[in-house]
Amino acid sequence: MRSLEIALAAVLLLQLLFAAAGWRRIVWPGRALATLTLLISGIQWGWEGFRWQLLPLYALAGLLALREWRRWRSHTPLSTSRWGKRAWWAVGLWVGGVALAVLLPVPQWPGPTGPYAVGTASWALTDTSRREIYSSDPDQPRRLMVQVWYPAAPTGEEPLAPWLAPVDEQIRAVAQSGGLPPWMLGQLRY
């Protein structure tokens, strides 16, 4: 999990513990935690990017904020007996969101090491003497994509190259080979 995702899960857990403790007379911590949760959710979504794996945590943040808003609007404390019936759903959403984020993480690749910058070049090679065996067209020549990384001396004018380009096509290909819908591997974009 990334740092803002961990912060979101931690504040949601605090909010759940506060609600489960039944501190009905103390109003401001619930409101503060609900506001903080929504703020962290928005910042995480905008800065680190939306991940479907966090949908249960986003939903829980919204539901707990709605609970606090209702509590504020009615000027009466919500009963803990009604909360007890809903607590299992809230805990399930929290556990589900954390489990999905941990089991399907955003990969963290190590940066290049050593004294040199890294350059890259890509070529699409075609061998006209051989036929492509993975094509439905029997007359299509064999094609191969090659990418090479090498030590380079930067001049400061080169744009940064992505590690995999184009990322969305790579995600689609990996998902298709595994029999998955492409949105399930959306975290690879990050």
Image (cartoon, grey):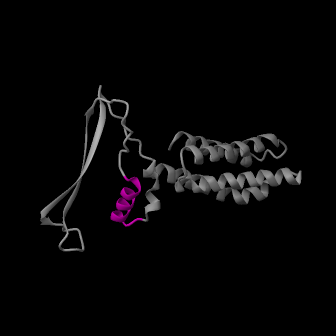
Query: Looking at the image, which residue sits at the far right?
Result: 75
Q: Is residue 90 left or right of residue 29?
A: left
**Which range of residues does the magenta coloring cover?**
166-180
Question: In the rendering, at what x and y percent does residue 120 appear?
Answer: 29, 41
Closer-to-camera residue (145/50) = 145
Q: Is residue 34 left or right of residue 152?
A: right
Vertical order, 95 against 35 (above or below): below
Closer-to-camera residue (165/71) = 165
Q: Residue at x 78, y 53 (%)?
A: 80
Question: In the rendering, at what x and y percent does residue 155 appear?
Answer: 33, 29
Closer-to-camera residue (154/171) = 154
Q: Would you say residue 84 is visible in this rendering?
A: yes
Question: In the rendering, at what x and y percent does residue 149 appear?
Answer: 26, 40
| Image quadrant where residue 138 sits | bottom left
Q: Residue at x 77, y 40 (%)?
A: 29
Query: Looking at the image, which residue sits at the far left?
Result: 129
Q: Is residue 152 left or right of residue 59?
A: left
Main secondary structure type of the part rendered in magenta: helix
Q: Residue at x 54, y 39 (%)?
A: 3
Question: In the rendering, at what x and y percent does residue 111 appear?
Answer: 36, 35
Q: Residue at x 39, y 61 (%)?
A: 172
